[in-house]
């Protein structure tokens, strides 16, 4: 048999079949847990659980006499994924396909021949069951009208057993809650004679800590002088896990006791950064992963902060030779732990949205949980509001209910100016006027929203040089601003707003600076406008897993910066001065904004466009 020309390539046909230029659709066999859809699709497994598949050449591509084939490999992909994987060999080892989502999935496989030509695809359609939900959830939204009631409901829907929690030791409900106005959290700032020992607990364990599990909660830390535990699962002597703040390490931590015994080794996954901010909402999650097998040598723990994994998973057997997976025997503790047979390390602050799962959540799942989604988008909580309207004297008080320090007016260049109705605004001379308070108001490694209503003085701005930056509001970070709302003068008649984030190293040197800029030139001089910056820590860019969040900018309720979104790859957390009317840039404070400011508001959480419209235009809401 001679060579033939197929698609411009000189090739020797396989087994004397001159009209079969490429391999036929290969055979796909499932080794579990997924089954092929026939007349009915039966859901199996869950997202993240690999299905094992065997690939073999089409029977017609195998020589009946010799059993040989010209198939040399396969190209494999799930149609919901980006890219494909190539495996070698006519009969390769079983292939692990990992579905990222639930629902119908299609595995497509093409065979390749010795000439490198890809053949006709075969498809294997299967259905993935939704992942199991939380087996316990305590949202603390059910504050009772009767003060004698001290129980908060377990609102999880997975399974049939519920584990309500009882508030003890002076624990109560607070309206400082992560879902904002109308919501409640667990307050562990006890004022009774047993002060410092407030907590909540279930009667029985809601999760078996011998198997894979995940725990999470929103924590609002009031101080850092001692170890403080957010969640734990005690046994007779120790805790199977504790999600906590470590005063020694000055870090958030997720640890697991090697055994239920006095003096046992605790294997810990610590946060990447030291000295986390206090007085802010932070999302914490801990994952214990057994890898779905009985081999204790591959068991790991890992901490997540604001949806981001901290370091690498920590192997328990490698850190503690005595490690044995064990089950907690007592109820879940919210606000304390157990060690050497006694309860200790009581939390001081607020806890909200606590939950436990009987599985190891994937990083993408933890990130989703940290978004705290509602029907209208991610939940937000107003955690700071400096409103100049009712202000008098030399300061603007925080009216958010969180008790932030007041914005103190500078001695020169800033004053409160009242209109005929008695409503004040903060007047800024653009030369030395500003107002400042001690920050931060949010955990900036998580999602947040900042919005200022400002009026820029057109005549004073026209006198500024080209290249001038005027900062309406910003949070100091060394010689920079960790975030800032900035107006930049690019040319005589060309100025534009931007929302900027900056990260620095331990020496204060800038390691990263990202910004999103307005699409239009600033034209609303001498008119009050709302400028809003949103940092969405949970947003990711396809193909860029290191991107830790995206910036968005709104002028009024109109979104700007519709091009490629700025993403942040470094941790940026401001400390020190939070100011309006000036900010830090390039080590300089000479970035004063001329005009006036009515208010500055900050929310924990990334506000949706619809949510922002409702906040900025309340008179339009029917």
Image: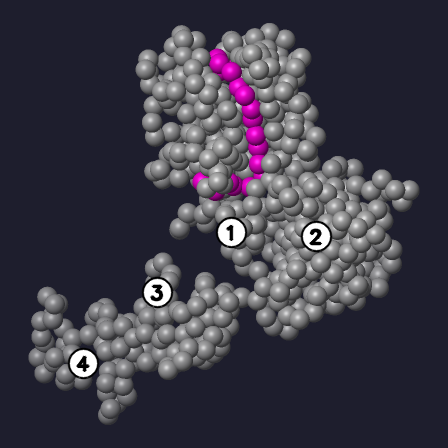
**Residue receiving disc 4:** 14
In the image, taking residue 74 as reference, residue 18 lies left or right, namely left
| First in residue order: circle 2 vs circle 3 | 3
Q: CA distance from mark 1 to mark 4?
A: 58 Å
Upstream in sequence: badge 1 or badge 2: 2
Q: Is residue 103 above or below residue 513?
A: below
Report which quarter residue 61 is drawn in: bottom left
User: Which element is circle 3 on?
Assistant: loop
Residue 19 in the image: state x and y as whole percent. Answer: 12, 79
Of 243 and 316, which appears nearest the observer? Answer: 243
Q: Does residue 256 appear anywhere in the picture?
A: no
Q: Is residue 300 placed above or below 459 in the rendered structure?
A: below
* Residue underneath mark 3: 79
Question: In the rendered structure, which segment of residues is drawn in magenta?
Answer: 592-609
Query: What's the residue at 43%, 18% (across, down)?
Result: 527
Q: Is residue 60 magenta?
A: no
- Bin the neighbour count of mark 1 within 10 Å (Cα to Cα): few under 14, some 14-19, many 20 and up: few
Distance of mark 2 from mark 3, alpha carbons?
44 Å
Q: Find residue 331 and name its label.
A: none
Q: Is residue 271 above or below residue 356?
A: above
Q: Closer to the observer: label 1 or label 4?
A: 1
Do callouts 1 and 4 mark residues in contact (Cβ within 8 Å)?
no
Which of labels 4 and 2 is toward the front?
Answer: 2
Question: Whole-Å distance between the Cαs marked 4 and 2?
Answer: 72 Å
């Amino acid at each position: 048999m001679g060579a033939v020309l197929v698609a411009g390539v000189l090739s020797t046909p396989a087994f004397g079949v001159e009209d079969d230029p490429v391999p036929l659709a290969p055979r796909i066999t499932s080794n579990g847990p997924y089954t092929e859809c026939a007349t009915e699709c039966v859901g199996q497994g869950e997202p993240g659980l690999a299905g094992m598949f065997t690939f073999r050449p089409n029977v017609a591509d195998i020589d009946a006499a010799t059993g040989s084939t010209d198939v040399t490999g396969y190209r494999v992909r799930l149609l919901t994924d980006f890219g494909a994987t190539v495996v070698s060999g006519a009969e390769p080892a079983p292939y692990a396909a990992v579905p990222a989502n639930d629902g119908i999935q299609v595995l497509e496989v093409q065979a390749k021949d010795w000439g490198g030509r890809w053949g006709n695809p075969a498809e294997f359609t299967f259905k993935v069951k939704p992942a199991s939900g939380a087996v316990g959830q305590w949202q603390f939204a059910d504050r009772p009208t009767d003060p004698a009631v001290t129980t908060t409901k377990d609102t999880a829907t997975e399974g049939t057993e519920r584990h309500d929690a009882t508030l003890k030791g002076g624990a109560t409900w607070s309206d400082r809650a992560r879902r904002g106005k109308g919501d409640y959290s667990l307050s562990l700032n006890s004022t009774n004679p047993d002060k410092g020992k407030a907590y909540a607990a279930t009667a029985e364990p809601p999760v078996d800590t011998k198997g894979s599990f995940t725990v999470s909660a929103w924590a609002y830390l009031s101080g850092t002088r001692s170890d403080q535990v957010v969640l734990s699962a005690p046994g007779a002597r120790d805790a199977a896990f504790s999600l906590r703040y470590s005063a020694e390490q000055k870090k958030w931590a997720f640890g697991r006791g090697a055994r239920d015994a006095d003096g046992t080794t605790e294997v810990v996954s610590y946060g990447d950064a030291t000295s986390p901010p206090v007085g802010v909402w932070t999302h914490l999650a801990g994952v214990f992963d057994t890898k779905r097998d009985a081999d204790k040598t591959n068991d790991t723990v890992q901490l997540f902060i604001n949806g981001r994994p901290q370091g690498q998973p920590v192997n328990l057997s490698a850190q503690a030779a005595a490690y044995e997976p064990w089950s907690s025997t007592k109820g879940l503790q919210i606000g304390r732990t157990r060690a050497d047979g006694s309860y200790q390390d009581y939390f001081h602050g607020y806890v909200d949205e606590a939950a436990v799962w009987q599985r190891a959540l994937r990083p993408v799942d933890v990130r989703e949980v940290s978004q705290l989604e509602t029907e209208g988008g991610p939940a937000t909580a107003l955690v700071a509001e400096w409103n100049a309207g009712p202000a008098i004297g030399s300061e603007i008080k925080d009216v958010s209910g969180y008790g932030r320090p007041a914005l103190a007016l500078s001695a020169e260049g800033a004053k409160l100016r009242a209109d005929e109705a008695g409503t004040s605004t903060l007047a800024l001379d653009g030369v030395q006027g500003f107002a400042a308070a001690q920050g931060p108001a949010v955990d900036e490694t998580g999602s947040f929203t900042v919005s200022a209503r400002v009026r820029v003085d057109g005549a004073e701005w026209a006198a500024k040089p080209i290249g001038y930056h005027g900062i309406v509001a910003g949070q100091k970070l060394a010689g920079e601003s960790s975030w800032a709302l900035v107006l930049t003068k690019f040319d005589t008649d060309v100025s534009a707003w931007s929302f900027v984030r900056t990260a620095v190293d331990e020496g204060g040197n800038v390691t990263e600076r990202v910004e999103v800029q307005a699409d239009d030139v600033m034209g609303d001089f001498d008119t009050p406008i709302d400028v809003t910056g949103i940092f969405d820590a949970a947003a990711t860019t396809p193909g860029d897993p290191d991107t830790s969040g995206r910036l968005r900018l709104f002028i009024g309720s109109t979104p700007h910066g519709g091009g490629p979104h700025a993403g942040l790859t470094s941790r940026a957390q401001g400390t020190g001065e939070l100011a309006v009317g000036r900010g830090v840039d390039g080590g300089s404070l000479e970035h004063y904004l001329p005009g006036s400011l009515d208010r500055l508001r900050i929310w924990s959480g990334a506000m949706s466009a619809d949510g922002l419209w409702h906040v900025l235009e309340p008179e339009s809401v029917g």
